[in-house]
Each structure stands twice: as structure tokens, then as C-alpha cells.
Image (tube, grey):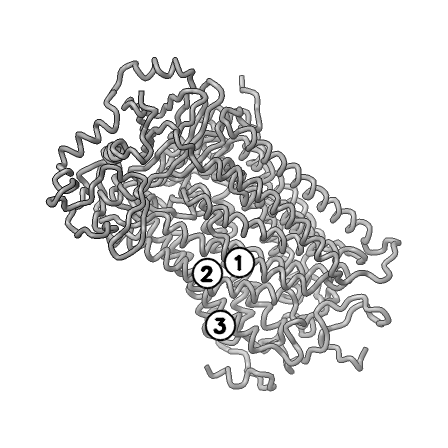
Amino acid sequence: MSPEFALMPEQASSVSAEYDALLFTEIGISVFFGVGICLAIMFLAWRYRAGSEVDRSDPPEGDMRLELLWSGIPLVIALGLFVWSAKLFITMRTAPKNAMELHVIGKQWMWKIQHPGGKREINELHVPVGKDIKLVMSSEDVIHDFFIPAFRVKMDVLPGRYSMLWFKPIREGTYRFFCAEYCGTSHSKMIGRVVVQSPADYASWLSGGGNNEPPEVAGKALFESFRCGTCHREGLTGRGPVLDGLFGKQVRLAGGGMVVADENYLRESILDPGGKIVEGYQKLMPTYRGQIGEEGLMQLIAYLKSIAPDGKQPEEKR
Amino acid sequence: MSTDSHSHGDDHIHPPPSNFLTKYVFSIDHKVIALQFFFAGFAMFIVGGLFALLLRWQLAFPFQEIPLGLGKFFYPNASGNLMPPETYPTLVTLHATVMIFFVIIPLLTGTFGNYLIPLKIGARDMAFPTLNMLSYWVMPPALLMILSSYFVQGGGPGAGWTSYPPLSALPQASTSSGTGQTLWCLAVFLVGCSSIMGGVNYLTTIINLRAPGMTLVRMPLSVWALFITSVLQVLATPVLAAATILLLFDKNLGTSFFLPTGVAVGGQAITQAGGGNPLLFQHLFWFYSHPAVYILILPAMGLVSDIMPTFVRKPIFGYKAMAYSMSAIAGLGFIVWGHHMFQAGINPYMATTFMVSTMVIATPSSVKVFNWLGTLWGGSITFATPMLNCLAFVSMFIIGGLSGVFLAATTIDIFLHDTYYVVAHIHYVVFGGSVFGIFAGVYYWFPKVTGRKMSEFWGKVHFWMSFVAFNGVFFPMHIVGIGGMMRRIADPTVYQHLAPLQDWNVYMTMFAVVLGLSQFIFIANVAISAFRGEPCGKNPWEATTLEWTTTSPPPYYNYEKIPVVYNPPYEFSVPGMEKDYLMQTTPPEAV
């Protein structure tokens, strides 16, 4: 038996309803104008067909008032849609400050997900209902795209940088997610499901085994094993900038310019340290390219976040 | 250039070349070059259409054998004549690449641009005839490369016509990113060169070689459209050329313009150093490819604006508004490329900026649509085949334009991006718009080119079959797109939520077969009418522009005496005239 066809999937996130309202408003406007103009073409074509008995005296050749009218009306409607769409877009692209952060890594052809407590899963995403969830995503190889239709969210997942996506599930249940950016032969099989659970069920799912080392703890271990602290510490021997409290701060660069020490900057500085040197320091640090994988990077960055009290502290930790 | 010194207005006429090779093959005659572009473009239209039918077959009947034993021909290396999974993205890539770079651009600017510009402005040829010949002769190697890419080891290019790196740059990530992708880069680069050479030539010709009295505001709108298109070609295409060359370097020479640090395929680190940015390619690609959408539609708008007044027997409504709005579309077209990257992780405020510039394009577009409506108003309309195609163009452009506003809105685009909704949108603009515009142009100027008319009856059969089948294929794509069917998936049946939509996929495929078959009516009509059509004389449609004052077909030198222009381009039904039209060349004392 084939399931019922529904034009739009369930409204399962906090923005779904407003998204659908905007979409259906625009469908309404478009159908009105599309059908109206096509009917007008048919009407005019029929009325003024050769040989028909109609008044053709003084046919118009141009009219400035009409030109202004039919440029003005679409402009006003377009700008109205612009304002509504822009407001919702900024909301959908600005994650709330205290959102719970999950790490997502895409690779040909699977999704690897890690929870704040360290629990991992593949092609499944368990989240608690009613919480703001932020996904920090990166790809190991080519460009992927994380798409959860029921939440009306979609974002490319790129190699070499982090992209963000946030949502707040409002209904328990199971929803599909897909890779939406063509990524190679098995692209269409790069799929999975989101399981939205009550906070209690989520907590018991979290405690159900698996690797429970939180990413910032794993990151601290990496930080120590790579001996990052030899240079990145206070005192005269500190050849690199101190990293405590760095995350989220503005940094002045050698040669001028400012940069926010966010995930992308930290990642770049680990893999390509000569690129953006902090003012007052030398080009000394070797690259860690090839020595540390996508997951290791995310863990290191999680550690750097955890030692930044003014930055976003992952307070959603259990 | 030897022809330059005496091509301005004086009546020196060159004899036509007598040698077969210089007359028909390496010709510098703009009319012959136009026909060369036409035959190459149409041959590729059939190839691109076949790719499309293979895609449609796969979507309706995934991994089932194609009928008539054709599987053996199309999938020679596959087991059981079935499509190998890697071939699907190759077909997607080649269909789009062929249709955009080898069909629509050569047909609109190569064919109509070449044929019409000198005739319509009263010139004997292009400003640079040899450059014109060269702009055609870089096409055949490009054409051979793109066709042979299907057969090379590893398969044809399979990263989509957008060829985003790293997928397109790393053979490890996709077998099709090997030799096939290299050939793709080279072919697109060569087509870009052809485009730039054509654009430079058209601009120079239109600025310098207009006949006496052919002021800018007396130019037919088709010439306006081709002029604006040429500006786009000259300014935007070099960026595409740069992007394809950089991609080629990344692929084959170990550079990493587009490859970031730390990429590993299947856990294996790549050999390139990294430090590049894949988004850079997207910026470069779309900086060309959004203006390219207007390269694909503006000439068709020009052709339609030329053809409609003839069959409405009325001047075009708002001539100046039409010219200004085309310029506005082209100008805005340069600052909207970011709307292809709304989901690529660009800054939301930057996305919002691109949204507003994109939304504003609705204004000049609607000015054009309403002016075409105004042209109908109060006319006396004959529904000849070119006119039917023009009306189809306008209505399909409305649908394609309105569906574009959805995608322009950043928020709505989040859900629709990368779904079949986008596929529907582009086909309404490029098939419903450009291709119907091309059909209108072919039916309309065929008598001028051959001296014979095409069959009206078969023209109408072809039109109605194409029009109905076109909507049958592409309208449902809006709905399946919103319903959750994504682009570039080889097998929709693996998705449970698409099960209720599978019947639609079957219907769309049936319409696609009808659409494909109906094009053979057109081809037969062109072929038979060229020899057996009714002879038509100089001006069968009783039109007003310059090309209708010379013989059909025009002589090698176009005009024995360079015409002098006295009137605007669309003087129909002027009160108090004996005939209902006034040629551009009729002097005031003769009225």
C-alpha cells in the first residue's frame, strides 16, 4: 500500500509553521498573477484576432502611467516578500546562544554525529524535544548537504570549514534527513533519521553505552599529546598566544585586520598556522595537517571552547 | 583587416567566393556561419534530448532495461544492457552542459546573432569576418571533446553542470572526475572562447556598421537584445574560463585553488597541499552562470519582440521601456549570483543582500510581460506558427519568472533548493522561454534564409504537441519538488516518502517521449520545406525591418546598395496609409 501523498512534510520544528505560511502566501500570489496574466493573454488574443469586429481605433503604443503601474506593483509585492523572508531567514540562520551543540561530519556516504557528552551515532540523530539544537558540521571529503524536510532546514556541509544549522523540534517522532548536494555515486543512499525524544528518553538513550568520553575531554588529551601547551602558555617562554578564554574573542592579526576566533579560525590556525598570525607573534608553529583528522579537530576546538569562560561555554553538558 | 576600409556605406561589393571550401566550410559570410551554428546546435539538441530521455526513463523505471535494445548502444560496457549507477550523474551533467553551452547559446547568439545583426542594421557582414569564422571553428573540437567524454575510461564528467569541487577535482571521490572531467573543462573553456569572440564581434558591428539613419532607437529590439547579450558575454565569460582552467590545474597539476586543507577521501589524505576554498569556485562559476541565464533568455525576448508586431499588425507597446528593461535585467544580472549559494554557508546578511537584488529583477521582467500584453491590445492578430510560439514564450516565461521569485526568497529557498522545483524553474525559463523563442525565430526567418515557407500545418502540429508535452513534463516537477524529490538522485523508488509520486514520474516520462518525438516533425518540416516549400519572395510576412527589403535568400553581400533608414522598426497600421505597414527604408516623401 502506498502511503498518502502530502505536499509538505509534517511541521515538526519551531519554524515550520511560519515557513509554510510564507510559502503558501507566495504560492497564492503567484497563482493569482500567473493565472491572471495567462488568462489576459488568451482574452486579448481572442478578442483582437484578425477579422473580429472590435474597436481598434487609436490602439495604444505606450503609456508612461501604465509602465509605472506595472513596474510599481511587482516591486512592492517583491519587497514585501523580501522583508518577511529576510526576517525569518535571519532567525533561521542565527542559533540561540544556549543551544545544545552537536557535531556532524559528512563523508562519502555517511553521517557521523557526536553528542556533547561524547556519544556517537551514524546516520541517526537523537535529539530531545523542545530544546534548541545547533549542529556544527564539516565534511571530510566533498560537499554534502544536511537536509531535514520536517524541520524546514538545509545547509551545505563543506570540507575545510564549519557550517552551522539550528532547529528546535516541537514534536516527538521520527523524521528523515537526506544529503541534498550531489556527492558521488551513492549520494541517494546518504540518508538517515532524526529521532525526537522526550528529555527523559533522550537522557536514558544517552546513558545507553557507546563512547562516552565528552569531546572536550578527548580534545584535552589531544592538546596534551601534541604538547600544544609548550608554546601556548603564559610567561616568557610562551611563543604562541595564550588560548584560555580565546574562543569567541576578536583577535588582532599581524599585518593589520581583525578576526573572530571562531571554529573556522581555530581550524585554519591548526592546519595552516602561517595564514593568519596573531599580532606580536612569529611564524613558528608547524602545521598539523595529516596528523589530525576531522574528529580530532572538532574535539580540540571543543576543548578550546571549554576553557573560554566568556565564550560560549557548553552548559548543556550533562 | 582588408574588408574594413570599404565596408562603411560605400557601394563596393565583394564577389562571393567560388571555391566550395571557402564558400561553405571555412566561410567568412555571416549567413553561412549562422547556418553552421544552426546545424551544429540542432544536432546537439538531438543528442541532449536523448540524454534527457535516458534520464526520464531511469526516473520512471529505475534500472530497468530500456526498450528497443537501445541499452546495448548507450551502455556498451554495462552488464545486461542496464545503466550502471555511475552513468546517471554523467547523463545529468552532459544533458545540462550540452543544452546550455552547445544548443541554446549557439542557436540564439551564434545562429540568430550572426544571421540577423548585419541584415537588420543594413551591413554587408560582421565587423571582423575572420574572427567570426574562428568563433565557429572552435566549436567542433569542443563538441568532439564533450561527446567523446562519455566514452573515456572512468566515464563522462559526473559532478553536474556546475562541477563543484572537490567532487569534480578528485578522481578518488568520483571515478567520473578523471579524464571525462578534464575534457569537460576544456570543452567549456573553448565554448567560452567562442562566446567571447562572438560578443566582441557583435558589439563592434552594432556600434560601427549601422546603415545611415539606423539610430539606436530605430534598431529592432532583437538587435538591442543581442547587443545587451554581447555585453554580458564579453564581461562574464572570461570568469568562467578562469574557473575551468583553475579547476583543470587542481585536477591535473596538483594545485589547490579550490581544495581546502585536510581533505581526505575514504580516510586517505589527498596529495594536494590544500589551503584553497571550494566556495571560491562557486563564486566564479555563478558570476558567469547567472548572467549566462540572461544570455539564454534575452535574445529570445528580442526575437519575440520582433515577431509579435508583425502578426499583431501593431507597433510594439513601449519600445523604449522594452529596451531599458532588457538593460536593467542585464545590469542586475551581474549582482545576483550569490542567490545560487544561499545554502552554501554564506553569511546570512550577504544572502539577504543578494535576495534584494534578485527580487528587484521581478520589476523589469514584469515590465516586459505587460508590454507584450499591451502589444496584443487593439491589434489584429493572425495565429501563424511563429506567433503561436511567441505566445507560448510569453506565458511560459511568466511561469518560469514567478517560480523564480520563490527561489529568490532566501527562506523559501532553504526547502526548495536542490529539489525538482529548481529543475522545473530552469526548464520553464530555458525550454519554455528560450526554446520556444528559437522555434518562433526559425519559423519566422526560415523564408528569408531559404526563399521558401515552412509548412504551416506541420508547424502547428509541432507547436501544439511540444506545448502540451512540455507542460506535461515540467509542470508536475514543481509539485514533486515541493513533495520532496531531490535533484540528481538516480532512483526515486528507494525513498519511501516518494512512493506516492512514482506514478507522476511515469507520466512525466511519457510526456517527455512525446516531446522528444514531436521534434522530429520540426526537423522533417525544416528539411522538406527547404526544398519543396512554397516560394515566398522578399517579404512574405509583410514585415517592416531591413532584412525583408533584400531578396530571399539574401545575396552574399546582403544589400547591393546600403539601405538608408527613415522609420522606426515597427510601423504597422499607421492611420492614413495605403498599406498597413511602413518599411524602415520608405522615405517620408513616398508615404
Q: Position of residue B104 (x, y in %)?
A: 53, 55
Residue at the disc numbered 2: B236
Using the rendered image, report if marks 2 and 3 lie on a common chain: yes
Q: Amino acid at mark 3?
A: Ser
Using the rendered image, report if marks 1 and 2 lie on a common chain: yes
Residue at the disc numbered 3: B27
Q: Which of the two marks, 2 or 3, is nearer to us in this view?
A: 2
Q: Position of residue B27 (x, y in %)?
A: 49, 72
Q: Is residue B553 visible?
A: yes
Q: CA distance from mark 2 to mark 3?
A: 28 Å
Residue at image position (54%, 62%) is B229
Residue at the disc numbered 1: B295
Q: Amino acid at mark 2?
A: Ala
Q: Is residue B63 visible?
A: no
Q: CA distance from mark 1 to mark 2?
A: 10 Å
Q: Which of the two marks, 1 or 2, is nearer to us in this view?
A: 2
